[in-house]
Structure formats: structure tokens, C-alpha cells
Amino acid sequence: MFKADIGYMVNKKKCGISVGQIYRALANQAGGYGRADYLLFGDVLAFDATYKRNKYMCPLVVFSGVNHHNQTIIFAVALIWDEEKDTYKWLLQQLKVAMNGKAPISVITDGDLSMKFAIEKEFPNAHHRLCAWHLIRNATSNIGKPEFTSMFKTCMLGDYEIDVFRQKWFEIIERFGVENKNWVLDMYKKRHSWATAHIRGKFFAGFWTTSRCEGLNSIIAKYVNSRYNLVEFIQHFNRCVDHIRWKEVQADLASVNGRPEEDAAKKELVNDVDSVRDSVQVDASRAGLATNDLGHSMPRDPRKCRRKGGFTVQ
């Protein structure tokens, strides 16, 4: 959260405005939030145009990313008339102008060829990755075998060496007899854009996970539907953006005023140590020994110790 936002909140609080109203006002400030977020978190850009939930079926292009709370955030949106190459090229040009010329390091798309063309023209140095969520959906619709989809997902996300990935890929293809499927052939040609084995070392901020795209789809679906005309659509979609920004503000508040949660693994380790210490103390007590705070056994009374045959016994 910026210092200006903090100052704004403090001043409103002094005027008697409730905390809830203050955060609601901040969440509704559409002004420079998208640009500020893109400046900070725009190294990874998800580029999606699958949201055709309006009366005229105009594609809504959503540019999203990941913030410092590991939340999905929206940088910018655009309603377009068609999905031609020149349309996407123009759209990315306008995005660069709006974001002061900043280009992303990595771009994630659903594999649309027009998007791919525009990205290569406008962001030639960006790493292009295909969204895992869309790939899994396409695997289901093109092959229609749940077991294939599951094995394809494992092959895609598995951290294999390239030779191992190639072996597993052909084993899957042979097992299901889909070596002549056009979708399968096309996917293997594009493996450098989706297989973890081929894109290891490139930065995607966790956007390879299927839950990102799926989560954003489900949030948008709660606010818009195909019955809305364009004016209604924009009004309801702005409510969706408000909701996402409100979540970020809540996370900021929790980060500033909350206490960090203890790591689960650390808790388990502490519990194991306590269990071992208690066990040692019980065994030592039965043997007539005392234990210190660390669970190490020691004689109950050193004065009662005597030497016998070169050893100290109790």
C-alpha cells in the first residue's frame, strides 16, 4: 500500500469515517490502481479473451497478474469487436501506451494464434506460455478420456528432464492410441510453451497453475452474464474489479496489523520434539533419573553417586 493511501486513510479516520467505509472508498478508486499494480507486478501478464458473457458476445480481454499477496489482480480490460491479429496487435500497443511502455517478461495465453502473433510483434522478448487450465480443458474436449487428461496434466507439470519428458509423452500417446490426433501433434510441436521440462528457469510467478485462470473465470461469472447489454455489463464488471481490489486491501490490512502464521512444518517439528522429550522424561523417571529442560537424563543426586570398578554408579 502506498504512503498516499495510508495518509488518505488516516485523514478520513480523523474525520470520523469508519474503517469499512474508508476501505470501500479505496477499493472504488479505479484511477491509477491498474497502472500502479502493473508497474509493480507486471513482469508476468496473463492475456485472456474467453469472457464472452454479454448480450452482443463481444470478447472481453482481461490482462491480469499476481500481487505480493499471491492474489490474482486485474491490470486492465478491453471490450473488442473481433479477435483478428490486427485487433490484438492494436490492443497491445494501447496497453503499452497506458502502462508507460513497460513490457512483461512473461506472457500467459490460452493458445489463440492471433494473440501469439500480436505478442511476437509487440513483446518480442517475452516468454510465451500456454495456460495449463485451458490446455487441460482442451485435452478433455479433444480426447475425451479422463485418464488421458490426468496423465497429460502430470506430464505437463512434472519437473522432468527433457529426455524423461519425451519418453513419458510417447508412452502416453502409445497407450491411448492417439498418435494421429491433430491436437496431440500440435501440442507436441508447442511443447516449448507448456511443458515444465522445456520452460524450467523462466519466471511465471506461479501462473502455470490451473487455479489462477479457473479462479478468475469463476469470480467474473458471479458478476456478469449473457443477458447484459454493454452498459450493464461494464457496470457489473466494475463491481467484480471492486471485489478483487477489496480483497487486496483486506490482505494489506492483515499484513500490517496481523501476526504471521507459524509454518505448519515448524509446528509439527516442535510437537515431535516435545513428544520425544516427554518420552525421555517418563523413561528416566522410571529408571530413577532426573532430566533437564532439554530432556537429557542426569542423576537425581550427584552426592549419592559412588565409584565402582572405574565407573560412576548410583
Image (spheres, helix red, strand yellow):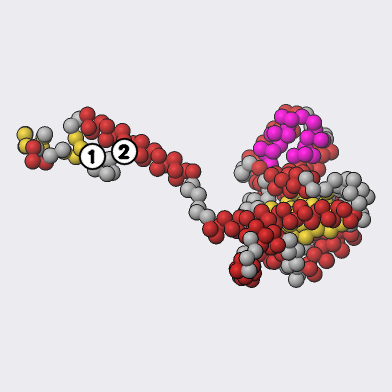
Determine whether 10 is above or below 303 in the image.
below
State the mark number for residue 291. 1
At a point 44% along the width and 40% down the height, the residue shown is 268
Front in this rendered view, residue 42 or 267: 267
Instruction: Using the rendered image of the protein, determine whether residue 275 is visible from the camera's viewpoint.
Output: yes
Left or right position of 71 against 296: right
- The numbered mark, 1 or 2, whose residue comes first in the sequence reads 2
Residue corresponding to mark 2: 277
Left or right position of 302 against 227: left
Where residue 48 appears, x then y in whole percent?
79, 52
Where residue 167 appears, x then y in whole percent?
67, 37
- C-alpha separation, residue under disc 1 versus residue under disc 2: 9 Å
Q: Which residues are magenta?
A: 136-156
Determine whether 101 is above or below 255 in the image.
below
Where residue 43 appears, x then y in whole percent?
68, 61
Q: Amino acid at mark 2?
A: Arg
